Image: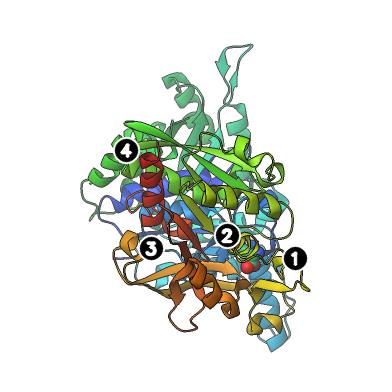
Amino acid sequence: MKTKYVFVLGGVTSSLGKGIISASLAKLLQARGLRVTIQKFDPYINIDPGTLNPYEHGECYVTEDGAETDLDLGHYERFLNVYTSKANNVTTGRVYQTVIQKEREGAFLGKTVQVIPHITDEIKRRMLLLGKTGDYDVVISEIGGTVGDIESQPFVEAIRQLQWEMDDEDCVVLHLTLVPFLNAAKELKTKPTQHSVRMLQQNGLQPDIIVCRTEHHLTPDIRKKIALFCNVKYNAVIESIDARSIYEVPLRMMDEKLDEIVIEKLHLKNAAKPDLKEWKKFLDKLCHPKHEVNVALVGKYVELQDAYKSILESFIHAGAANECKVNVHSLHSESVTESTVAEKLQGMHAVLVAPGFGERGLEGKIAAVRYAREHKIPFLGICLGMQMAVIEYARHVLGYTDAMTTEVEPGTGHPVIDLMADQKRLTIKGGTMRLGAYACALQKGSLACRIYGKEQIKERHRHRYEVNSDYVAEFEQHGLFASGKNVETGLVEIVELRDHPFFIGVQFHPELKSTAENPHPLFVALVKAASEAI
Ligand code: GLN
């Protein structure tokens, strides 16, 4: 079967949830037996979001093959339960880099290199790339930003050309807009949607489907108005009303028959009846928790929910698996000190110390680890959180009061967390961390091994610093032991504590592999331990 394409563009404002709509549509098509993938095109000039501060665009999501990508790829994986890859995230920077490199190689000798056709051709090439593998029936391409932005123009033009080049039944253009409710007038307003669609039309692009984000139900009149003025069929105006949980959106989209419209337009004759049994089971558990736990999330980006997106979602998955509502209490690591920690962690049934970079908030993280260790509160430290657990142990159990990571104190007398030799040589920041999936061997009988239920795992990484192997023997003598080690290098990937009900630090990011239908065992076990701590 020929691969079909869906293009998703947003209008009116950002943050309407294009990623969730794309993932929901993909889920519905997948539930009908189709092979689907989603890719994200980001109009910014960074080559990838790896060098961006989380305050800019939220967390950086790392794929199995080590690409640093937009957090929407996390939604794709969490909804579809299949891996994405480097090819699934493309930025303007990446597109220009390829074109400029080709120019230097002489690929366009004699020609003026221009946005049209050279940049748009490269965008088109990448839009079709995953489809060419033959692995997918449908490829959904989401375009970041909002229609009308200067930087998204080449992407809109590329889609226009593809829409023109392809047969009618090979592509669908979906436009997501906002239908605001004016409280004073007590009315839903369609004008912003009309303007947004007109802007698309000015660029030669006609949407086939309009998905309207709204806080109130769309009346038939409103739907008619949008259909008429935006030149789409009545049933192609889809209501996307605020949902209790993002995981409900696929079902809402099914009620609105979004999948049926796409299937009809794309002539997807082999689409089966949707099977959402597992999804509904997950949702049912999510919506009907039998008890609650309180978990502290200690980090320095807590003001911004998107900075810890995958961790928060992992707790939702693990909560559902335990039929338990997980109340995540964000604690700013700068507000935690030796004297405030007891009060801050009061009532918490588990503590998660978050990943991060740089010096800010480190001491707060160390204080939180110490409290969890000494008071036997279930603890999970991720990446920097694990590194802080190692430092805390070195300081307060081994007595190395100056123990530190060389990330913030290169001259420390006890560099228990240190840069590996291959990292020391690097001068370039972008894309040079230890990235992507690495195999890790688990020590038989350890808590980690029991939780995973196997002796070898593969988890995703994003860091430069490592536990310094010179100290491992000493740590182990006292009770902090390496229960997981990198299969090839022997580097420490997991530490855990003897004589503690649940104390685990992981150098990798388990949150990147948790999905709705396949919750991560470490999070499931942490929530379980938290429930038992009540
Ligand atoms: N800053 C630490 C390192 O680079 C931890 C990174 C992280 O938490 N992702 O090793």
Residue assigned mark 1: 408
Q: Above or below — where is 334 with respect to 158?
A: above
Q: Above or below — where is 411 with respect to 256?
A: below
> Distance of mark 4 from mark 3, alpha carbons?
22 Å
Identify which amino acid the numbered label 1 is placed on: Val
Residue 262: x and y in percent read 36, 47
Disc assigned to residue 389: 2
Which of discs 1 and 2 lies nearer the camera? The answer is 2
Q: Is mark 3 within 8 Å of ligand 1?
A: no
Q: Earlier in the sequence, mark 1 or mark 3?
A: 1
Residue under the image location 44 percent in, 64 percent down: 84
Q: Earlier in the sequence, mark 4 or mark 3?
A: 4
Task: For mark 2, give the secondary structure.
Answer: helix
Q: Earlier in the sequence, mark 3 or mark 2?
A: 2
Point out the quarter of the image occupied by ligand 1. bottom right
Task: For mark 4, give the secondary structure.
Answer: loop
